[in-house]
Image (tube, rainbow, N blue to C red):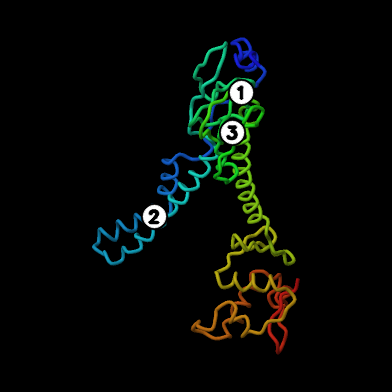
Amino acid sequence: MEEYLSGLSTPEVLERRERGEGGNATEQITKTRSQIVRENLFTLFNFLNFLIAALLFAVGAYSNMLFIAIIILNIVIGIAQELKAKKLVDELSILNRPTVTVRRDGEEMTVGIEEIVKDDLVVLTSGSQICNDAVVMSGVLEVNESLLTGESDAVVKEEGAELLSGSSVISGKAYARVTHVGDENYATRLANEVTGKRDEMTGAEEKKGKTEQIVVGDVVIEPRTWKVWKKDRELKLPNREFELLRFLAENPNIVFSKEELFEKIWGYDYISDAATVSVHINRLREKNEDDARNPKIIETVWGAGYRLNA
């Protein structure tokens, strides 16, 4: 026990660092506040809106500038949300205490977190942040693990008890031997897991947006990108034509009357009548049928309506 309480010697520290058992320099896993502000403020969308507002101001059309208040509110909300998310992740990443007290060669000294190596003997007292997983070698501590477990009650740690990085000391004093460093630490693994799941979800959404397609013969419809392809040629469809084609493609082999299609795509309050459906159907056939006069994709069911054949 006395050997452990004297800590590592300088050669032992160097040996462990050569074996890759030392801490790594702390990496920032979240954006800085200035990055968050810049990325939310300096966008092409904001530039165009502020340019329009400046032109309106220049010609004295002040009443038409009210939209800029919504743009500013949107920017503020975006920044506030990202700053809140940053705060939560930073609390998990344990970046609040840059130095740690250790015993080496029988003496106490202060070192940076990145200088800690496996088997280092750290000195923990009231208010200390536990930056590395460790085992209590001597002494008794009351530890706050609320960041890790959500429990606000203090946990007593005696000799042989495990200490998790990310917790903090409420009271007591103890010597603890470091068991994990760098990415092996519990708090680091937890933060990386949260970040990894978020990136995985984002990547899955992006992949879904790229791969979600409706294929009808040689016509490919991409609902998320509002694009339609016939073989290798992109078809330029106005919004109503695209909505009509997408609705029929999402409900293949079902006959819809002109009135039903008009209600679904245009709505009852639209100033027109169901005859406009026939006009749009004819335009779609001219673009996606090989022979518009003998349609194979969007078929007319006489006396009933239209059906998309899948």
Q: Is 295 situated above or below 106? A: below
Q: Which residue is mark 3?
A: 165
Q: Residue at x 75, y 74 (%)?
A: 309
Q: Residues within 10 Å of mark 1 (few under 14, many from 20)?
A: some
Amino acid type, mark 3:
Ser
3D distance between C-alphas at marks 3 and 1 = 18 Å
Badge 3: residue crowd in 10 Å (few <14, some 14–19, many ≥20): many
Image position, residue 302 (x, y; %): 72, 87
Residue 48 numbered mark, or none = 2
Residue appearing at x 41%, y 45% in the figure: 37
* Residue 220 occupies quadrant: bottom right
The number of discs equals 3
Q: Residue at x 55, y 38 (%)?
A: 144
Circle 3 or circle 1, nearest the eye: 1
Q: Secondary structure at mark 1?
A: strand
Give the camera-side residue of 90 and 278.
Answer: 90
Tag 1: residue type? Ser
Give coordinates of residue 92: x percent, y percent.
55, 40
Give SS at disc 3: loop
Under circle 2, the secondary element is helix
Among the two numbered marks 3 and 1 on one chain, the one whose residue lies closer to the N terminus: 1
Relative height, residue 249 to residue 183 (above, below): below
